[in-house]
């Protein structure tokens, strides 16, 4: 299913998560690990191997968040 989405629609920060672009609030850290803070205040862990991909995705599609 994830393979059928467009890159601008969302990101898969971890193998068990796909996050819609509309819900991403910011990239932050928790206990020294990268997390995506979502608009509902929940946090999604970013896999170590996906950190650069997530940063690039944010820069490309969400340049207005920190």
Image (cartoon, grey):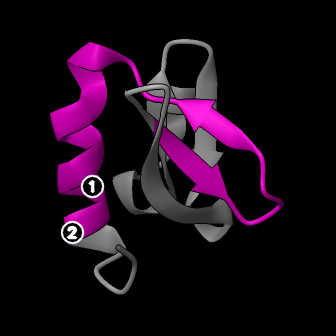
Q: Could you tell whether 22 is left or right of 3 in the image?
A: right
x, y (%) of residue 9? 51, 59
Q: Nearer the viewer, residue 21 or 27?
A: 27
- Name which residue lies at 21% across and 38% down: 53
Q: Quadrant of the C terminus?
A: bottom left
CA gap, disc 1 to disc 2? 5 Å
The numbered disc on residue 34 is none
Q: Is residue 3 visible?
A: no
Secondary structure of the residue carrying tag 2 is: helix
- Residue lying at the far right of the rendered structure: 40
Quadrant in the rendering for residue 58: bottom left
The numbered disc on residue 57 is 1
What range is drawn magenta here? 35-59
- Name which residue lies at 49% across and 26% down: 31
Q: Which residue is mark 2?
A: 60
Q: Residues within 10 Å of mark 1 (few under 14, many from 20)?
A: some
Q: Quadrant of the N terminus?
A: top right
- Residue lying at the far front of the rendered structure: 31
- Name which residue lies at 44% across and 31% down: 13
Secondary structure of the residue carrying tag 1 is: helix
x, y (%) of residue 5? 51, 45
Q: Are marks 1 and 2 in contact (CB under 8 Å)?
A: yes
As drawn, 19 above or below 44: below
Q: Nearer the viewer, residue 26 or 61?
A: 26
């Amino acid at each position: 299913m994830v393979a059928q989405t467009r890159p601008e629609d969302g990101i898969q920060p971890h193998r068990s998560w796909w996050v819609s672009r509309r819900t991403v609030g910011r990239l932050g850290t928790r206990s020294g690990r990268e997390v995506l803070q979502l608009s509902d205040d929940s946090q999604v862990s970013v896999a170590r191997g996906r950190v650069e991909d997530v940063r690039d995705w944010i820069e490309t599609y969400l340049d207005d968040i920190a």
